[in-house]
Amino acid sequence: MLTELIVEDLMTKEVLTVNPDENTVFAFETLMKNKISAMPVMDDDKLVGIVTDTDLGHNLILDKYEFGTKVKDAMVKEVICVSSKDTIAEAIKSMFENAPDNEIINQLPVVDDGKLVGILSDGDIIRAIKEEL
């Protein structure tokens, strides 16, 4: 049952990440090529931000970035995270409560003891609900 699951049960453990000094075009291409919507930004082993396909795509299309704009200049720096031991209900609550303007956060990095151990997406949660139907 979904209410009994914890983040660890649904999260993706193999997480693609990007370096803050990488070019935004490269980051966007990586997101598109891998059909994912967000990548944590890692400086060595430290989570320093997150980039999303929506943010990068819109800003690239609107020419808001100059040639050579780095990920560190485009990333969201205040990253909402969850623990692998949090319940799915807590994660969903966090997705809603921490999003601006009645939106939802689609991706939550999973961090245990300061270390990135996975990522939980709204798609992961929807697939779990589908399996229960």
Image (cartoon, rainbow, N blue to C red):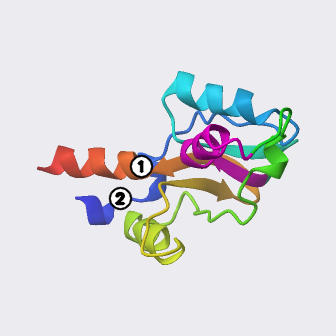
Is 130 covered by the magenta stretch? no
User: Which residue, given by chain and number where applicable, does mark 2 sit on?
Assistant: 5
Callout 1–callout 2 Cβ contact below 8 Å: yes
Please give the count of numbered marks on the rendered protein: 2
* Quadrant of the snapshot with the N terminus: bottom left
Q: Nearer the viewer, residue 57 or 10?
A: 57
Vertical placement of residue 22 versus 86, above or below: above
Q: Amino acid at mark 1?
A: Asp
Could you say which is closer to the camera, residue 61 or residue 2?
61
What's the residue at 40%, 63% (across, down)?
88
Q: Is residue 10 visible?
A: yes
Q: Is residue 63 magenta?
A: yes
- Image location of residue 126, percent across then percent down: 29, 50
At mark 1, the secondary structure is helix
In this view, the residue farthest toward the top is: 33
Q: Along the horizontal axis of the image, is 130 left or right of 81?
A: left
Can you tell which mark lies on residue 49? none
Question: Label 1 vs label 2: CA separation?
Answer: 6 Å
Question: Is residue 46 in sight in this rendering?
Answer: no
Identify the element where label 2 is drawn: loop
Residue 122 against residue 32 in the figure, above or below: below
Quarter of the image for residue 30 reads top right
| Disc sitting over residue 9 in the figure | 1
Please report the bounds of the magenta region as a residue range.
48-64
Q: Amino acid at mark 2?
A: Leu
Which x, y percent locates residue 39? 64, 42
Relative horizontal placement of residue 82, taking residue 97 as reference (left or right): right
